[in-house]
Amino acid sequence: MSDAGEVERVWREERGRLLAALVRRFGDLDLAEDVTADAIEVALERWPVEGVPPKPGAWLMTTARRKAVDRLRRDKTYAARLAVHQVDADRADHAPPADAAGSDGGLPDERLQLFFTCAHPALPAEDRIALTLRCLAGLTTPEVARAFLVPTATMAKRIVRAKKKIREARIPFRVPGPDELPERLPGVLQVVYSIFTEGYAASSGPTLQRLDVADEAIRLARILRRLLPNEREIAGLLALMLLIHARRDARTGPDGSLVLLDEQDRGRWDRAMIEEGRALVVSAISGGPVGPYGVQAAIAALHDEAADVATTDWPQIVALYDVLLALTPSPVVALNRAAAIAMRDGPEAGLALLDDLTDEPILRGYHPYLVARADLLHRLNRLPEAAAAYRQALESAGTDPERLHLERRLHAIQESGRGVAGTEG
Amino acid sequence: MLLINAGATQDGTAEGCTVEDWMAYDKTVRDAGIFVSGESLADLVTATTVRVGDDGRRTVTDGPFAETREVLGGFYVIDVADLDTALDWAGRCPGARGGGSIVVRPIADFDV
């Protein structure tokens, strides 16, 4: 590998840890980002000439720390902030735990603190996602902006606003204690899962999936799992994402159109990813109370294990949805449960449940609800109603592949309708 | 700074807590050594609003006529290390109960 390639690799691996350690030390995200960038610049100049040092992470850390101290000496504003921060640090007495030393020559891994800072409940949800992508996934601001289809200037403003709140409201860089963790961890998991879902099913735009965004979410969940190996919901979330992501290649047709589960070429599913996901499901749902991500992962595993839709274990999927509905009662879960019941007991039973949900405000205009209803009407051969339902669903389709898929269904109904009319006439 | 937006009841006291709750909280804050200043405000009906329009003219009205029952009932200025600590104190404030809420805001630091 070329030195530039090696720098790139080290950069990618070390950036998050470096940033987190510097934030903890200097209490300022902007400063930490600036000196992390400075350090990599020095590395890019020197490593190709002098060779990559034996402990590149520690080397980058030392360089960045020196740069930070230089800046603080020059900049009175930063110096004042640092003084405040150090007083706080002494008062709070967070000495790093003895086992915090990382794999690279004692560079401690403080990314967990950064996860909780970026996902702090005092920040608006959209800012949490943006900050996590920026600080922990290491995406640039234009990349984060592209991932959420907003102008770079808008995203830059959002990130500046979030950093300002962290600094001025003094959101601490800390891992919540065991008593607070149950309250705070779901927020972190929610951020990671939101990143994944944006990658898995883009809310709008020309393509259905943005695989790089989904990959980043999985990478973040892997880091989280390494940092908090005993939290079973992290295993559940990672399993869920792997088991869904395993189907990515089969989810779109050659023309980019959406291919639903029942029509996917299961030979194109990623077997290795499924195996990894299944193993994680076991640790997520055994030996203690199960969480919502673990249950959803178990459902995804049942889909991934089946050879086709007909042999899918629908009774067990329905049972898992019952558990999920008890854990997190919501119309969206009820909708999915209804779809599973339609597979177990027939479309009539499913449609009756869906019609019970018509008055749920969340589901009004909710695309998956409209599609599920259209599909069941189609299966019941109630074609005029199905056509009307597809038209309604089309109005709420966010991406072109979804639209294409629905237009095809609608077209098929109209064709068969014409056929019937033809034989009659 | 903890701004106490307590849900006011008919008789002017805050909802979901007693006078004793307030006294106990007040004592805890002072005993913890974090108390800087604070006041509890008189009943809302005594409030008056002043606005200055674009033309520079001052209008004085009775009010505020809050659409919700949440009104500023008082405040504490406390000196704590970070937001999490402040949120913890806010959560213990009786004004947070019974539909009330506490807004936590840092004091602006103009030296930096």
Image (tube, coloured by chain):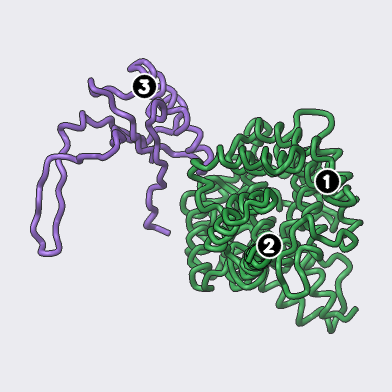
Q: Amino acid at mark 3?
A: Trp
Letter of the purple chain = B
Residue A139 seen in the current view: no
Among numbered discs 2 and 1, the one appearing first in the sequence: 2
Closer to the camera: disc 2 or disc 1? 1
The correct choice, above or below, for A214 with respect to B7 in the image is below
Name the residue beneath numbered marker 3. Answer: B22
What is the x, y in percent for residue A1? 90, 78
Could you tell me how far apart the alpha carbons at marks 3 and 2 are, in whole angstroms?
A: 49 Å
* Labels 2 and 1 in the same subunit: yes
Q: Residues within 10 Å of mark 2 (few under 14, many from 20)?
A: many
The correct choice, above or below, for A247 with respect to A139 in the image is above
* A302 vs A309, nearest the viewer: A309
Q: Residues within 10 Å of mark 1 (few under 14, many from 20)?
A: many
Name the residue beneath numbered marker 2. Answer: A199
Residue B22 seen in the current view: yes
